[in-house]
Image: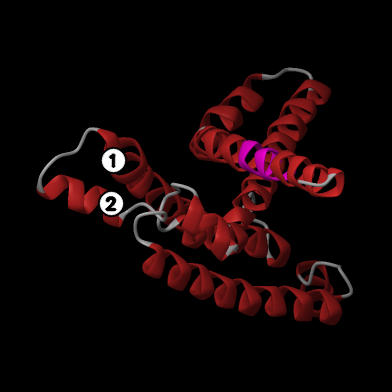
């Protein structure tokens, strides 16, 4: 083996190891992010109750700003971390939840609703946000618990179900769901881009209220 071949082998090994480390870290952290997202969303009534107890308006505003910022940052982070579900080589190689890509689509749907509406003040938008987060949680945690985590302990028929819910042992379905997720993301991305271009990044609600006043 020539020195150049040895160098290439070392570089390839480092790159492969770094990629596996990154993917493993994302796969380990993503369930925690999902739990935090769901917890903060479900904890909204508690935050509102705490805000009503504040006697100082500044303290109430700061609490709401911190809550909303952490919640939205986690939602964005959860979507970004879910990008690994859209790469066929990753889902075929790593043991990931089978429908993780669809969970990412649900998270992007939440971001789209936040772009086009205000779930914190519009009950209809809040309900759709809750539905999408619930669906996303089911799409992620059902295959994660029954597939990824139960794969090493399941036996008999349960083992077949567990293997079906893991991407590395069910590559055909994993790649197919990944492509479907990409198509759904492209559609919602086009809707988001069209909305941003049409409105110029400004909400339509104030314009509608001004028009009604005229």
Mark 1 is surrounded, within 10 Å at the Cα level, by few (under 14), some (14 to 19) or many (20 or more) other residues, namely: many
Highlighted magenta segment, given as a residue range: 15-21
Q: Nearer the viewer, residue 163 or 93?
A: 93
The residue drawn where x is 71% and y is 79% is 190
For residue 98, which quarter of the picture? bottom left
Give whichever of 5, 169 is nearer the camera: 5
Q: Residue at x 49, y 48 (%)?
A: 94
Quadrant assignment, res 77: top right
Q: Is residue 20 magenta?
A: yes
Locate residue 210, reporting x and y percent: 84, 73
Left or right for 83, reference 140? right
The image shows residue 184 at horizontal and vertical percentages of 56, 75
Q: Nearer the viewer, residue 1 or 32?
A: 1
Label 2 crowd bin: few (<14), some (14–19), many (20+), radius 10 Å: many
Tell me if 81 is positioned left or right of 175 in this view.
right
Dominant secondary-structure state across the stretch colored magenta: helix
Quarter of the image for residue 139 reads bottom left
C-beta proximity under 8 Å, tags 2 and 1: yes
Q: Is residue 12 left or right of residue 20?
A: right
The percent coordinates of residue 149 (x first, y second) are 34, 36
Residue that label 2 marks? 163
Residue at point 85% right, 79% down?
197
* Residue 112 pos. (x, y %): 66, 65
In this view of the protein, can residue 1 be seen by the observer? yes
Q: Residue furthest left?
A: 156
Kindly report the distance in space between the C-alpha atoms of the residues bearing marks 2 and 1. 6 Å
Disc 1 target residue: 151
N-terminal of the pair, mark 2 or mark 1, is 1
36 versus 108 height, above or below = above
**Circle 2 — which element?**
helix
């Amino acid at each position: 083996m020539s020195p150049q071949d040895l160098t290439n082998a070392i570089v390839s090994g480092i790159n492969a190891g770094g990629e596996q480390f990154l993917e493993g870290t994302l796969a380990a952290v993503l369930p925690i992010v999902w739990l935090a997202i769901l917890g903060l969303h479900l904890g909204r009534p508690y935050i509102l109750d705490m805000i009503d107890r504040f006697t100082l308006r500044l303290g109430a505003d700061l609490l709401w700003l911190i809550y909303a910022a952490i919640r939205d940052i986690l939602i964005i982070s959860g979507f970004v971390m879910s990008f690994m579900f859209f790469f066929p080589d990753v889902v075929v190689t790593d043991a990931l939840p089978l429908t993780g890509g669809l969970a990412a689509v649900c998270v992007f749907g939440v971001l789209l609703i936040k772009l086009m509406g205000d779930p914190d003040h519009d009950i209809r938008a809040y309900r759709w946000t809750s539905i999408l987060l619930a669906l996303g949680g089911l799409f992620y945690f059902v295959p994660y618990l029954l597939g990824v985590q139960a794969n090493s302990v399941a036996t008999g028929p349960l083992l077949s179900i567990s293997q079906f819910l893991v991407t590395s042992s069910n590559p055909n379905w994993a790649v197919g769901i990944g492509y479907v997720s990409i198509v759904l993301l492209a559609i919602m991305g086009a809707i988001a881009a069209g909305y941003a271009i049409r409105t110029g990044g400004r909400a339509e609600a104030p314009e509608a209220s001004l028009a009604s006043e005229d």
